[in-house]
Image (tube, rainbow, N blue to C red):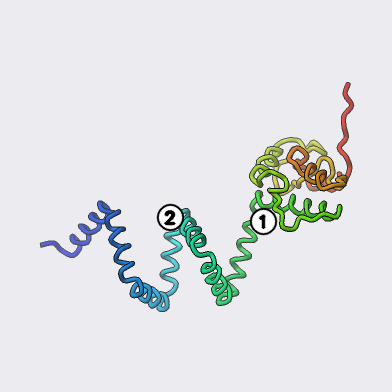
Amino acid sequence: MRTKEEKREYDRQWVVANREKTREYTRKSYAKHLEKNRASRRQKYAIDPEKPRARRRALYATNPERFAEEARKRRAADPELVRTIERKSRAANPEKRRESSHRASKKRRENPLNVFKAHISIRLWGALLRIGGQKAGRRTEELLGFTKQALHDHLISFLDKPCGWCTIPLMSLTETSIDHIIPICTAKTEAEVISLNQLPNLRLVHKVCNSMKGSKLPILKEQP
């Protein structure tokens, strides 16, 4: 006769060998006793909320793509329900929401993709406003015709090369800023604003060099 440990080991081996069958049985059983299972989960969560949170964090760490895909499916299936749940969560946990918002904002600021896009978006908005136009309701990528990934790849190519103003090599993103070779302030129409924000007119230079250059036009070398 098998001991308890032997039976457990046999069950584990059977589950591993029949993983799909086990998952299907679990799904059917959960659907059959849905309300009972939900009530049990709520009760366990009320007794010790940290335990299920830790388990979910561990599962997310092993397969973040799966959780992201499930979240996208839920939002696509019923966006209004998702928004309602998010509003209730924000109202019930304002401090947690603020901390989460700060973390997300810091992560976005540290991502070069977002830094470059934000810089171009602000400059584009200011230039359009100066000539009496407006950017409201229009996405930067749609106006300019390239993605933030294309912008990132173009600007990153200037690293480890001489600065276009002082010729000292550009060593780090933290010491650089985006320069419009032909200054954007020279644009008089929306078409010119968009033209001067195209990739060939954008480069990385040192922050100090960009401040010194200001709105000066590039110095063209005379052809011999």
What crowding class fits label 2: few (fewer than 14 Cα within 10 Å), some (14-19), or many (20 or more)?
A: few
Q: Which residue is at the front of the view, 42 or 138? A: 138
Residue 119 horizontal/vertical position (percent):
74, 51
**First in sequence: mark 2 or mark 1?**
2
Q: Which residue is at the front of the view, 192 or 173? A: 192
Residue 108, quarter of the rendered image:
bottom right
Quarter of the image with the N terminus is: bottom left
Q: Amino acid at mark 2?
A: Thr
Residue 52 horizontal/vertical position (percent):
41, 69
Provide the secondary structure element on which disc 2 rests.
helix
Q: CA distance from mark 2 to mark 1?
A: 26 Å
Q: Look at mark 2 in the image and give the residue it sits on.
A: 62
Residue 33, quarter of the rendered image:
bottom left
153 shown above or below 71: above
Q: Look at mark 1 in the image and give the residue it sits on.
A: 109
30 shown above or below 46: above
Quarter of the image with the C terminus is: top right
Camera sees residue 191? yes
